[in-house]
Image: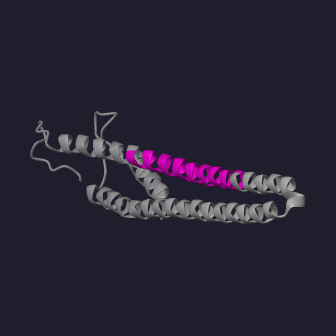
């Protein structure tokens, strides 16, 4: 199950929980079930983190490939440039063509870098949003769990009666 679905399931469970009598903010739920759901969520998150790391590695590979291609194109341009310079009749033309090839290669390499950076930035932004929502959900769950724990230790007039969870 997707971690976001798991979070939705936990939220639905909290929303569906019975309220503690005489309270609007405190509720009752099966602690073991909540802990099990949170443990499953925790187990799924490392997979998403691994996917983000793999995405970064993929970005680095694409950038490296782009750099190698740019270097190859530049090298070819420089080789072509040197060859053309040696021929007296077309020296001026060769210099212009080599400069054009080098500029084109640099432009293409820059375009590839920007495309990869935009792609990775978008993917990381989506992942950041997911993690932010997950952490907020976990924090809410923990806060509610702590609140319930405090309610469970309250000794009122019904102290002999066990709590329903």
Residue drawn 78% across and 57% down?
98
Work out whether residue 41 or residue 160 is closer to the camera in this orientation and state it: 41
Position in image of residue 136 (x %, y %):
39, 43
Answer with the quarter of the image where residue 66 lies: bottom right
- The extreme right residue here reads 89
Position in image of residue 113 (x %, y %):
62, 53
Q: Is residue 130 magenta?
A: yes
131 vs 159, left or right, is right
Residue drawn 10% across and 39% down?
155
Position in image of residue 148 (x %, y %):
24, 43
Work out whether residue 114 or residue 120 is closer to the camera in this orientation and state it: 114
94 vs 17, left or right, is right
Q: How is the image coloured?
A: one colour
Magenta residues (range): 107-135
Work out whether residue 148 or residue 128 is closer to the camera in this orientation and state it: 128
- The extreme front residue here reads 88
Q: State the count of labels.
A: 0
Q: Is residue 125 magenta?
A: yes
Position in image of residue 51 (x %, y %):
48, 63
Q: Main secondary structure of the magenta part?
A: helix
29 vs 128, left or right, is left
Residue drawn 69% across and 53% down?
106
Residue drawn 35% across and 48% down?
138
Answer with the quarter of the image where residue 62 lies: bottom right
């Amino acid at each position: 199950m997707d971690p976001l679905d798991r979070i939705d399931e936990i939220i639905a469970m909290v929303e569906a929980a019975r309220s503690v009598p005489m309270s609007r903010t405190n509720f009752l739920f099966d602690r073991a079930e909540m802990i099990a759901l949170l443990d499953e969520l925790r187990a799924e998150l490392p997979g998403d983190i691994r996917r983000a790391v793999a995405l970064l590695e993929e970005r680095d590979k694409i950038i490296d490939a782009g750099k190698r291609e740019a270097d190859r194109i530049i090298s070819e341009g420089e080789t072509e440039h040197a060859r053309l310079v040696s021929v007296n009749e077309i020296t001026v033309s060769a210099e212009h063509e080599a400069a054009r090839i080098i500029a084109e290669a640099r432009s293409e390499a820059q375009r590839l870098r920007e495309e990869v950076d935009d792609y990775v930035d978008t993917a990381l932004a989506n992942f950041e949003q997911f993690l932010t929502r997950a952490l907020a959900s976990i924090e809410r769950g923990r806060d509610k769990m702590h609140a319930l724990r405090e309610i469970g230790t309250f000794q009122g007039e019904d102290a002999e009666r066990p709590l329903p969870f």
